[in-house]
Amino acid sequence: METILIAIFVLGYLAITLEHNLKIDKLIPALAMMAILWAMMAFGIDGFTTWFDSGKHALMENFGALGHEDKMHMLEETLLHHLGKTSEILVFLLGAMTIVEIIDYFDGFATIKSYVKTRSKRKILWIFAFLAFILSAIIDNLTATIVLVSILQKVVRDRDVRIWYAGLIIIAANAGGAWSPIGDVTTTMLWIGNKVTTAKLIGYLLVPSLICMLVPTFIASFMAPFKGEIDLEEAAPPKSKFGSKMLYLGLGAIVFVPIFKTVTHLPPYVGMMLSLAVVATFAEIYSNSKITISSVDPESDAGSHHSPVHSALTKIELPSILFFLGILMAVAALESLGLLFNFAENLKQGIGLLGTEIEGTEVSDLVVIILGIGSAIIDNVPLVAASLGMFSEPLDNPLWHFIAYSAGTGGSMLIIGSAAGVVAMGMEKIDFFWYLRKIAWLAFIGFISGAICFIIMRYFF
């Protein structure tokens, strides 16, 4: 039965990675895979002899000796446990996405364009690289890429030059998302899963992530596409006089979430909901709308397009939310049977000679680097979800921070390797093989440079 479950997971995973070839949205195989795996587990529950206790992070003793009813009860409890943990991530992402869309409703991101006053291509490269690095740490790398590529389209009119900038934005955005608990879905998963804390994450990864961004940007600044000057268009007047206020309010509200978690010790989604409530309140006041977020009055719905909150909720990426639900719950199914735990133990024993001793636990740097390279080929979300079930290191162990770095930045090596790359690919119609020839080597150099920096820092601090 375990072999069949693994085969189903592999087939579903292939369908996800071949999304563009099959022309099937990746959320479909993710949801189907999740449902089939848990259904197969329910049908074959009596044949399983091992079960992984996620709470104790260890295999249960004498699971095979339990009766059918006890095993089904354990399956239902485990399913509910994983659904709760997954929902924490999804609700958090929904709140963050809504705040970003509210900012966009007031054209708040146009404020960022005002920072670009130079005509030098090299200076513009550095401006966008640092903006991507900083913004992605606050509003996540996917959203930062959408915002900056949109602004880039208004600043650089030559598409052949613009796609070079987009390539470096992808690298910078992924690097910036790695050192922030709210900068990348995978980092958020580790943070919500109590594997890393905000202070330690920033302390361990800020410098390596910065190196990951600086090295390729520095090399690119001497390349032909970034030499010379561009023609700047006159800035269009802002669409809303509240744009800058909503930008600073929204970004501040998102940054407040880690502070709220530190003070209250409540899950991050609680703080995100409070931040959303505050931002939504000001948005409603500024829009002079009487439509409320909970309105179900048909007459009110006729004018709901005037409400920034309603408008924001219609634009958030629900397909991405459903994809995360499917893939995280599918990985949870394999974790529940102890397959990931056993695989991790065998993996660590098999290449233990290549490992390094970290706080009494043998962990291979090579495994984590391979995970980072693998995230460029396949989605980094299930890779990190799998690592949560594979390793049992304590909170803030360097392993978790290295996983956060590798999974967050490794995807830059292929344009389909990260959400930021996929969205830039769609917005600028960037060719896969063009990116592979022109940008991938820069991303690889940045990734390895940051990894070396992390390893060095780990031994000295």
Image (spheres, rainbow, N blue to C red):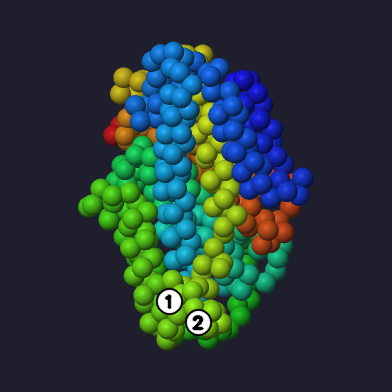
Q: Residue at x 56, y 33 (%)?
A: 38
Front residue of 268/114: it is 268
Counting residues from the start of the chain, the first of labels 1 and 2 encountered is 1
Crowd rating for badge 2 (residues with CA inside 10 Å; few <14, some 14–19, many 20+): few
Above or below, 292 against 3 in this view is: below
Kind of residue at disc 1: Thr
1 vs 2, front mark:
2
125 left or right of 389 in image = right
Among the 4 quarters of the image, the one containing residue 40:
top right
Distance, label 1 to label 2, CA atoms, is: 9 Å
User: What residue is shown with label 2?
Assistant: 300
Q: Which residue is mark 1?
A: 292
Count neighbours of disc 1 (C-alpha within 10 A) and say few if under 14, some if 14 to 19, many if 20 or more.
some
The answer to whether marks 1 and 2 mark residues whose Cβ atoms lie closer than 8 Å is: yes
- The x and y percentages for residue 308 are 48, 76
For this view, does 180 lie left or right of residue 420? left
Q: Quadrant of the N terminus?
A: top right
SS under mark 1:
loop
Residue 179 is left or right of residue 14, and the answer is: left
Q: Name the residue rendered at 34%, 26% in the picture.
A: 56
Quadrant in the picture for residue 440 = top right
Q: Please name whichever residue, 97 or 440, is drawn nearer the observer in this view of the structure.
A: 97
> Does residue 373 appear in this view?
no
- Inspect this view and state whether residue 68 appears: yes
Q: Secondary structure at mark 2?
A: helix
- Locate residue 364: give its quadrant: top left
Residue 302 position within the rendered picture, expressed as x and y whole percent measured from the top left: 56, 82
Residue 146 vs 328, above or below: the answer is below
Q: Position of residue 163 (x, y in %)?
A: 67, 59
Q: Is residue 299 above or below residue 449?
A: below
In the image, what residue type sits under mark 2? Ser
